[in-house]
Image (cartoon, rainbow, N blue to C red):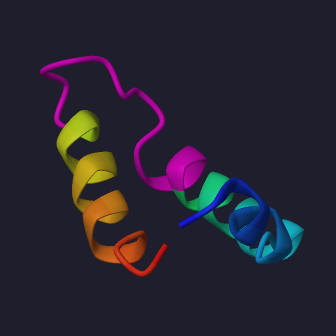
Amino acid sequence: MSFNHMLNHLDIDTAWQHLQWLNDNAPARINGSGDDLKAAEYFADNFDHY
């Protein structure tokens, strides 16, 4: 996938929703805190189509 392809598919609203989820559900993403695993699972579940 090219950089230009990714740029053409960026959506600020979706990006903001991902940031809000991280802030609300995994605010302390320090290694070993548990929130780091929540964030990793979220990324694995939601970003595989990118």
Residue at 26% from the left image edge and 35% from the top image edge: 36
Res 5 → quadrant: bottom right
Residue at 40% from the left image edge and 27% from the top image edge: 28
Q: Is residue 9 above or below residue 33?
A: below
Q: In this view, does 18 lie above or below 46?
A: above
Q: In this view, does 37 lie above or below 19?
A: above
- Tell which of 26 and 4 is nearer to you: 4
User: Residue 38 at x, y = what percent?
Assistant: 25, 51
Q: Is residue 14 left or right of residue 11?
A: left
Q: Is the magenta stretch mostly helix, strand or loop?
A: loop
Q: In this view, does 28 lie to the left or right of 20?
A: left
The magenta segment is 22-34
User: Residue 14 at x, y = what percent?
Assistant: 73, 74
The number of discs equals 0
Residue at 58% from the left image edge and 45% from the top image edge: 23
Res 30 → quadrant: top left
Q: In this view, does 10 lie to the left or right of 3?
A: right
Residue at 78% from the left image edge and 62% from the top image edge: 4
Q: Does the magenta stretch include residue 30?
A: yes
Q: In this view, does 44 lie to the left or right of 8?
A: left
User: Residue 15 at x, y = what percent?
Assistant: 72, 63
Q: Is residue 33 magenta?
A: yes
- Tell which of 21 and 42 is nearer to you: 42
- Tell which of 2 and 23 is nearer to you: 2
Q: Is residue 43 above or below residue 46?
A: above
User: Residue 24 at x, y = what percent?
Assistant: 55, 53
